[in-house]
Image (cartoon, rainbow, N blue to C red):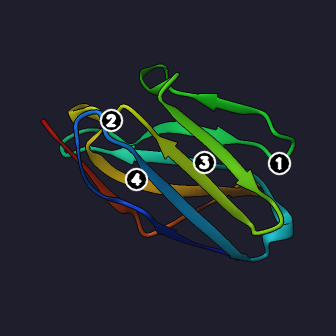
Amino acid sequence: QVQLVESGGGLVQTGGSLRLSCAASGSIFSINAMGWYRQAPGKQRELVAAATSGGTTNYVDSVKGRFTISRDNAKNTVYLQMNSLKPEDTAVYYCNADSYGLDYWGQGTQVTVSS
C-alpha cells in the first residue's frame, strides 16, 4: 500500500505560479513512476506530468515549457512547479503513484487560476 498526501493548491491570478507537493508513505520502495493528473469540471482526468524513478519525465503538450515535475527520492516526494498559469489550468490536481502496475491516488488539491 502507498499513501499520498498532496499540498500546495490554491487561487492564483493568470501568469502566476504555484508549486504542488505530494509526499508518499507506505510501500515506497515499490514505486516506479509518480505523476500529476488533473480533472476540470465536465472533463476527463488527464495526465499532466510524470517522472519515473530513473528520471525520465513527460508532459502533456499544453503545459510544456510552463510546468516542471521533479522528484526527491530521499524525501519520497514529487513536486509540480507551475509557472505562467492560465485559466484553463484550473482543475483538481491529483498525485499518482504506480507500484507494480497498481495505481494509487492522493485526495486531490484544487488549483484555480483567475483571469
The label shown at residue 85 is 2
Q: Kindly identify the residue that appears in the image at 59 percent across and 53 percent down.
A: 79
The residue pinned by badge 3 equals 35
The residue pinned by badge 1 equals 53
The span from disc 3 to disc 2 (Cα, nearest Å) is 18 Å
Provide residue 76's location: percent of width, then percent of height: 74, 67
Mark 2 burial class by Cα count in 10 Å: few <14, some 14-19, many 20+: many
Q: Amino acid at mark 2?
A: Leu
Q: Earlier in the sequence, mark 2 or mark 1?
A: 1
Mark 4 burial class by Cα count in 10 Å: few <14, some 14-19, many 20+: many
Q: Amino acid at mark 4?
A: Tyr
The mark lying in front, picked from 3 and 2, is 2
Mark 1 burial class by Cα count in 10 Å: few <14, some 14-19, many 20+: few
The span from disc 3 to disc 4 (Cα, nearest Å) is 10 Å
Vertical position of residue 36 compared to residue 20: above or below: above
The label shown at residue 93 is 4
Q: Quadrant of residue 114?
A: top left
Instruction: Pick the residue in front: 13 or 47.
Output: 13
